[in-house]
Every structure is written in C-alpha cells, then in structure tokens.
Image: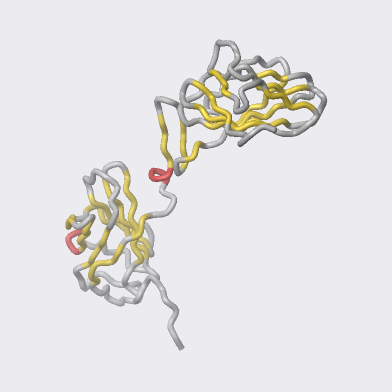
Amino acid sequence: MTDIIRPWPYAAKPYIQFEFKVDRVIFWLTFQYPMDTSVVPAAILFTAKIDGVDKGLSVVNWKSAYTLNMQVQPFAAHPTRVLLSYAGPSEDLRTTWQKQWEPWNVILCHDVPLDWEHVLDVDVNNAIVTIHGMLAFSAITLTAGLGQSPSVSKINIIWLDCSGGDIVIRRFVNGVDGQRLFIARLDECPNDTVIVHQGAPPGQLINLHAGFDETLTNEFGGWTLLCNGSEWFDLSHAWHG
C-alpha cells in the first residue's frame, strides 16, 4: 500500500511557515505529534537561510504541544525564499512518548497565508484602504433633494432611490486618484436620474462618454466612473446608439 504524502516525513520533523512583521521574520513550526514542551530548544540548534544569507534565531518558545515559535530580528523587508535547518539531535528534545528529535537539513518554509500585513494596504494621506490592490467597497444611497454634488470620500457604490423624486448629479467632491464609482438605480419608477456631462462647479467634473447629459427613466441601470484625482470619466459604454 502506498503511503499518503504528508508535509511531515516522520514524527519529530515539522511543517514550517514564516511571516514577516515590521522588522522581523517569525517562524511557526507545526509538528504532527505532541512534543515534550518541558524543554525549550536552544536557538543555536537552528539556522535560517533567508534570501541566501544565514541568520541566527532567537526567542524560541512553545505555543502549544504541537507548535514551536521563533524569530529572526532585526530584518528589514519581506523575504522571498526562506529555509530552516535543525542541527540536533539533542537528548532532551523528544515527543511525548520520548522519541528523540532527528536532525533535519534545510526545509523550505511557506509564507503564512492571508497575513493581513501583506494583503492590506492603507493610504493614510488619501484615506484609502486596498486589499490585494483592489479598492475596498463602501456604499451610500442618494434620494431626491440630497444635493447635486455628493461627497464620495471612501465611497465606491452609489445607490439611487428615485421613488421620492428626480435625482440630478452635476459633479462629485472628495474623489481621489484611482477611485471607482458604481452608480445604480434601485427602482424603475417614472422619476428621472440624471448625470450631467461637465456640469457647472463647484466639485469634480464628470466626463460622460457620449458628451451629453444622460438620463434613466422608468428603467434600472447605472454608470461606472473612474477618477484621476480631479475629474471623473465614464467607463459605462463602448458606444451610444
């Protein structure tokens, strides 16, 4: 019978992950079986090779019977390739049923998935949060009488509720470079939704594709707009018939 392929070839050899946090590389060693946590391994028994450079480890401690934690500090940037080796054996380092740790040569370490420091990007100056480079979505709802130059600060979706009357949008304010707006009607009532092409100030200009005002009446629909920091550009249509 063929054995199932596992990340742990034998009892006292771990699956290893790393994460970069600000100024250090943190290692997480996960064992298949419970380990004797009464003895903390000496840091000198481990060697990390990070982007081709040997690094000593420190702050070794048990997080649980299955998880050992250690780190390399200081370290300036997120590494691309990380290897970890254990010199052993040490007679005091064993599983709970007293199997001695085996020495292991370099093991390729895997980046911890969904580490928020990698996927979350905060632009403090422009008050933008991006996830994997995509603007995080938030929404507002406009109704009749809410003004013709709405603020879109930190906004990506505008819902239009026309049930109480016409909605006319002449310009936007507080848009930032790279911001997208998805504008959609919530009903097909007889009231108008109007987006004004290059409407009068104040606010950020809206440049519609066909070069004239656009109106939705008695129908669902909407617009997609992109901001360059000072003006908005219509991406909704390839052409107008």
The image shows residue 192, relative to residue 51, as above or below, that is: above
The residue shown at (45%, 44%) is 132
Q: Nearer the viewer, residue 67 or 105?
A: 105
User: In the rendered view, how is the structure colored?
Assistant: secondary structure
What is the residue that sits farthest to the front in this orientation? 241
Q: Quadrant of residue 95?
A: bottom left
- Residue at the far top: name it: 201
Please tell me in which quadrant of the rendered image residue 145 appears: top right
In the rendered image of this protein, does residue 107 appear above or below residue 146? below
Expressed as whole percent of the image width and height from the top left, the position of residue 183 reads: 64, 30
- Residue 138 in the figure: left or right of residue 143: left
Report the residue at 24% width, 71% height from top. Answer: 104
Give the camera-side residue of 127 and 69.
127
Q: Quadrant of residue 67?
A: bottom left
Q: Position of residue 175 (x, y in %)?
A: 51, 23
On screen, residue 74 above or below 222 = below
| Quarter containing the C terminus | top right
Q: Is residue 81 left or right of residue 229?
A: left
Say whether residue 230 is left or right of residue 151.
left
Residue at the far right in the pictured view: 190
Q: How many marks?
A: 0
The residue nearer to you, when weighing 16 against 82, is 82
Residue 72 screen position, x and y as percent: 23, 51
